[in-house]
Image (tube, rainbow, N blue to C red):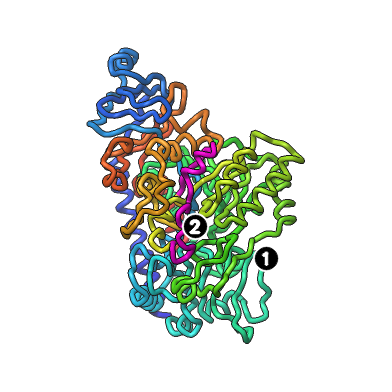
Amino acid sequence: MARKQTSFKWLKIGLLGLLAVVGIWQFWLTPPAYHNEILFTGGDIVTVTQGTKEAMLVRDGRIVAIGTKAEVTALASGDAQQYDLEGKALLPGLIEPHTHPIATAQFGAAVDISGFTHSNRAEVMQTLKEAAEQWSPNGWTIAFGWDPVMVDDLEPPTLAELDALSAEKPLVILTQMMHDAYANSAALKAAAIGPNTPNPVGGEFVRDADGKLTGTVREVNAIGQLFSHVPPPPAGSIELITNMQFGAYARAGFTTIAAAGLVSTAHDQVTMYKRLAAHPDAPVQAIMYGLPNQLPAQGGPQAATEPGAIIGVKFWMDGSPYAGGAATDEPYTVSDLTVQRLHLPPGHIAPLNYDAMSFQQAFETYHRRGYQVAVHVQGERAVEQTLDVVSTVQAAYPNPGLHHRMEHNALITSGQLARAKTLGMTTSFFVDHVTFYGHRLPEIFGPERTAHYMPVKAAIDAGLRVSLHADNPATPIGPMRTFAAAVTRQPHRGGPKVAPDQAITRLEALRAMTIDAAWQLGLAEERGSLEVGKAADLVILSANPLTAPEESLATITAEATWISGRRIDSRKTTAANAALLWEVTKGLF
Ligand SMILES: [Zn+2]
């Protein structure tokens, strides 16, 4: 107990010190000033829809001219800010159409055991052991990123192992794909989960042959039940780290993000998200798809241009390919990886999270209210049931302007893509699976299915408008890594390219991260390309991704962003963050 109080005192002193530093920075480093008129020249101006130009003029937050340097300069007033791109590229601000900002912020604060930073099981267990021995603010140890596909020898932990790591203190490990968690006995007890606890719909507390809990917790509703018992962090701290997370998207080059369901443990997270999105200095334009219980009881979606707008609703039809959760037509491939590491029985076929009738009832409700529905689908059966329901409901209540979304689409077939097109649907691909998991796909799905995995090209060929996403925190933020993955299909560990036929052109990839993502979110009139009349949502990239050498694509960085002509201050030390930090600090005394 004495140790706890001492640590707490140091935490308070540390926070006060940080606050002082932030205050001093604020005093000396005021954010860049807003300029009414900005003239950009000196680098490639990549419009995405109308080729590459020499100059662009922004006035009162809107693009008013694009063209040759002579033409555009002639239109600028005498006191326009002259912005020399110095050979770098100006593009429309990037759009992330499927991310989880609050969860990314929270898991960023958890113990990192991911395959991005660990290469074998011994390293992962050592990190867990050290973390479990340390003091933690809420008395629980929460680790994130358990990844048996990226970490070659990572067998699931037994309950005995989890209890050996931490006998008294609750320990919860969340897998990288967030479809499984492992809890020690102390955590199960604290969450009031026992051998007789019923499984929630769409979730499972896994039991062995004798009916004893194994510590494994499967799928979102069971994991949510477990996490609902984790003591909350200091009041206001999630709001602070979420706003810092918004800044991280801006630093990466994004000007618009859409949360695909708020899946954090934050209290009243919709209100918090909307409040941060509506702040006049928000570093990114944030909108969202809600879980069914996050939507208002009545009425339809808000306009996507409203800060924090709930534009749609999110469902999960199946789970993660790397946790045995993809609802495929054919069983998972039998291999050491699937049987020994993922512990899938030979012949494993994943269930769907909904039967057709219950999904149809839910879908119909939101479709009729005018909400766009975004459905997580990985295996062919998940896609098929989604298409069947959309087809039935669109026939009964036609709304051709409502482009329902399918998310990730690992194993979607060309026939299904054609059907999606006729139903007016749109697809968003998690193409970074190729980057991080591509080298192991043949062991999970065999060579044939690997040969058309994440078929982005086939979707474009079918006439669909596609977007690309990183689904943070499932993978780290890194838009140019995503871009490179779509263009090269190269796994980061080397080895053969994954389904190289599914590579798309650089312009197609850029469209998928700008104008087509904007269209998917209902924002294409306003954002997503550099065109006269559109909002000046901009990013400067260190090189033009349409012409840079292929091997350098993933390393292109964002240098600045603007939203409606407002230069974004994406530092952690903004006035808004200082104010949020002050609220947290006050609450500790
Ligand atoms: Zn997601």
Look at the numbered discs 2 and 1 and tell me whether their residues touch, using CB distance below 8 Å. Answer: no
Instruction: Give the number of the mark in front: 2 or 1.
Output: 2
Of residue 89 and residue 295, the one placed in the foreground of this image is 89
Left or right for 286, reference 209: left
Q: Position of residue 515 (x, y in %)?
A: 47, 34
The span shown in magenta is 442-469
In which quarter of the view is residue 146 placed? bottom left
Q: Position of residue 32 (x, y in %)?
A: 32, 35
Q: Position of residue 125 (x, y in %)?
A: 38, 77
Residue where numbered disc 1 is placed = 201
Q: Is residue 460 magenta?
A: yes
- Cβ of mark 2 under 8 Å from ligand 1: the answer is no
> Farthest residue toward the right?
396
**Which quadrant is home to the N terminus?**
bottom left
Could you tell me if residue 368 is visible in this image?
yes
The secondary structure type at the circle numbered 2 is helix
**In the figure, 49 relative to 142: above or below?**
above
Q: In 3D space, how far apart are the residues under numbered discs 2 and 1 (Cα atoms)?
A: 30 Å
Residue where numbered disc 2 is placed = 449
